[in-house]
Image (cartoon, helix red, strand yellow):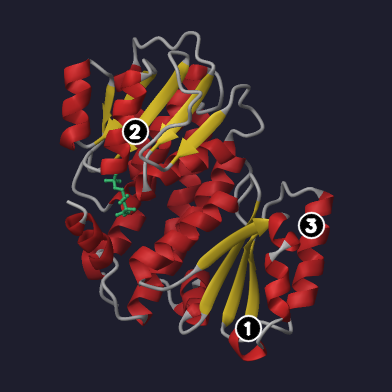
Amino acid sequence: ELDKGGMFDLIYKFPDHCIEAVNITKESISGLRFNNIMNVVITGMGGSAIGGDLVRMLTTDRAQIPVIVNRDYKLPAFVDEKTLVVASSYSGNTEETLTAYDYAKTKKAKIIVITTGGKLKEKAAQDEVPVITIPGGLPPRAALGFSLFPILVLFKELGIGFGKKSDIETAVSLLKRVREKYCPQVPEKDNPAKALAGKLHGKLPLIYGTSNLTDIIAVRWKGQMNENAKHPAFYNAFPELNHNEIMGFEGDSKLLKTFEIIILRSPNESDRIKKRIDITTDILKEEVSGITEIWPEGESSLEQMLYHIMFGDYVSAYLAILNNKDPKEIDFIDELKERMK
Ligand code: F6R
């Protein structure tokens, strides 16, 4: 198998990116003071926004102040001088993020920028806004370590999350074991990521997570299938999908047989959520092509999250091979950005 576009290599490097991102962030923010912050708004798009969303998900149980992820030109009206706005754009040239940055500026919010360069870095330099400069040259989705860990470390400084060195090191060593299990050298019979890609080929994946445990990971899986594999995919989360989406499964049985459901499980699900997943699986198992549950490895929620992410990244890259696509190319996104100029 060919590593078209070098995507397998980049997935393999994810744990190294995480460590590098932690070090860069610690250096960049040392000496900064974050007093009097009442809420946090992380603003970005696509591969840059998801890192914020994942940290938001991971810290739901701990954060004592509201944290919002914003994917728009505008920011919410509550943003003021007591808001910390984290403007994250890998390229530094994403127009929604640049406009949101300007808005944050007019509201006198405290701002911190995460970028490789571009106009965002120029603006920040002009405004004397602190920048966490991450290494360039990667597709933003393959730079997840660099959009996620700066925010995680930042949250630790703000006292609204975690990012203990030992937690991060344990999680990264898990990732290093995981990458040996799922990498292209391991044959399909021993490689669950390859096997799952085979199951999804020619099917429509519906990726289900659980609110605040795995829902954002489901978003990541969906996005990776879309961008790397050029494969349509959709996501939803328990318990919400029990209140609407489930009704679609009373529909056209021929259409339903094209669906492959993936459920991203978590050992932290409550008993009520477990029961919902069991009942839903029971109702849907005859209607769809198949249902696969994925339980994470690892003890901490950080480890479990990173495990799920790496698994999904590998699945998307194997699916790209089956679809005969280059995982690095994103023609429609490029065309859109070009035509919006
Ligand atoms: C992911 C990807 C997009 C970008 C998004 C925003 O690989 O290509 O989702 O992340 O278009 O661009 P940046 O991250 O440069 O702000």
Left or right: 112 with respect to 202? left
Q: Which is more foreground, mark 2 or mark 1? A: 2
How far apart in space, not on screen, are marks 2 and 1 (Cα)?
40 Å
Q: Is residue 114 above or below residue 78?
A: below
Of 21 and 57, which appears nearest the observer? 57
Q: Label 1: which residue?
A: 256
In the image, what residue occupies the spot 36% across and 24% down? 104
Label 1 Cα neighbours within 10 Å, binned few <14 / some 14-19 / many ≥20: some
In the image, what residue occupies the spot 50% across and 48% down? 306
| Lower sequence index among marks 3 and 1 | 1
| Res 100 label | 2
How far apart in space, not on screen, are marks 3 and 1 (Cα)?
24 Å
Q: Amino acid at mark 2?
A: Ala
Q: Which is more foreground, mark 3 or mark 1? A: 1
Q: Label 3: which residue?
A: 274
Of 2 and 110, which appears nearest the observer? 110
Q: Amino acid at mark 1?
A: Leu
| Res 338 label | none
| Lower sequence index among marks 2 and 1 | 2
Image position, residue 142 (x, y; %): 32, 53
How far apart in space, not on screen, are marks 3 and 2 (Cα)?
39 Å
Of 126 and 310, which appears nearest the observer? 126
The count of marks equals 3
In the image, what residue occupies the spot 27% across and 24% down? 131
Image position, residue 87 (x, y; %): 34, 32
Is disc 2 in contact with disc 1, using a CB cutoff of under 8 Å? no
Q: Is residue 202 above or below residue 197?
A: below
